[in-house]
Image (spheres, rainbow, N blue to C red):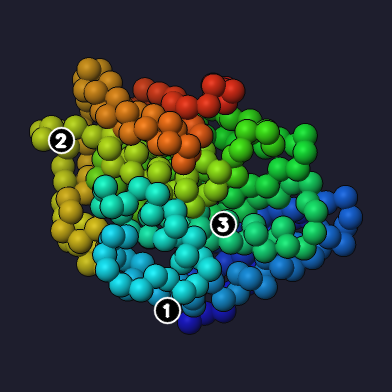
Amino acid sequence: MTTATATWLDQERLHLHHGPIDLVLTASADCAATARRAYHQATRRFASILEELVAELPALRRHHASRGPGPRGSVASRMHAAVGMYAPHVFITPMAAVAGAVADEVLAAMQSAGPLIKAYVNNGGDIAVHLGSGESFAVGVQTLANTPLGRIRISDDQGIGGLATSGQGGRSMSLGIADSVTVLAPHAAAADAAATLIANATDLPGHPGIVRMPACMIDEMSDLGTRRVVVSCAPLAPPDIREALENGARLARRFCRAGTIKAVVLCLQGTVVQVGHAALQLDPAP
């Protein structure tokens, strides 16, 4: 297996890379030495994460409700706990939270260095964020095809520690047709798992314009097995778009009421729907 690498992108942003994992992170502190320790702690913790996940991969690809011993590793435990909030009522494996859990783990390592003013770990768009008192964080929301939808500003008093995006055409396969579902939650792993499920629910079962294929025919190692994932979706009529978005929004509202997430932005073929935290305003893209 390759070795993890660390490369400075500029004076504040550090790029960590190992196999399929690419992180960009930054930290600021009143004490420069604390910030340096935060970067060091992140690099040190990151070095073994991939090997730890590979060692437990067969178990992490099983449905959360399957029998068997729980995970041993810290990141795997975060994944297991995040999807456990939604299982056994729906099919979900811990892999649905892998990107967010990795971001959470590295952020926790950074915080162990001492008090930080602000820090974030961006794992391919799934972001773990720490905000000190009075701090805020502005993030661009976009579809998985990189179409900008606007910007959201998160403040330290909103209880948001992570965000994640899922949908059709992303890094992972989806059972639904959403162009993107962005979830804001107390932790990135929770956001990651919820985004997967809400994106799956944003759907029109049986619609003739949606092409599906068993996941295992696209990737024989997929944790989705023979479940049919969306390959393509034809342009939809406005009533169909509204129906699909409402299917996803209904589940999003349920998760918000349960307190597992804070807010959601759903997008399908140019139509955007917001659910959740009233104080989170999506400013239109320029």
CA separation, marks 3 and 1? 19 Å
Residue ID at (67%, 69%): 43
Which comes sooner in the sequence, label 3 or label 2?
Answer: 3
**N-terminal label among 2 and 1:** 1
Mark earlier in primary sequence (3, 1) = 1
Residue designated by label 2? 205
**Which residue in the protein does label 3 denote?**
103
Residue that appears at 35% across and 53% down: 172
- In the picture, the disc for residue 258 is none
**Label of residue 55 in the image:** 1
Residue at (63, 71) in percent of width and height: 45
Q: Quadrant of residue 179?
A: top left
| Residue farthest bottom in this picture | 1
Give the crowd class for mark 1: few <14, some 14-19, many >=20 residues within 10 Å: few
In 3D space, how far apart are the residues under numbered discs 2 and 1 (Cα atoms)?
37 Å
Evaluate whether residue 60 shows in this view: yes
Q: Quadrant of residue 245?
A: top left
User: Regarding mark 2 in the picture, which secondary structure is present there?
Assistant: loop
Disc 1 residue type?
Ala
- Amino acid under disc 3: Ala
Classify residue 162 by image quadrant: top right
In the image, what residue type sits under mark 2? Pro
Is 282 situated above or below 163? above
Horizontal and vertical percent position of residue 143: 43, 36
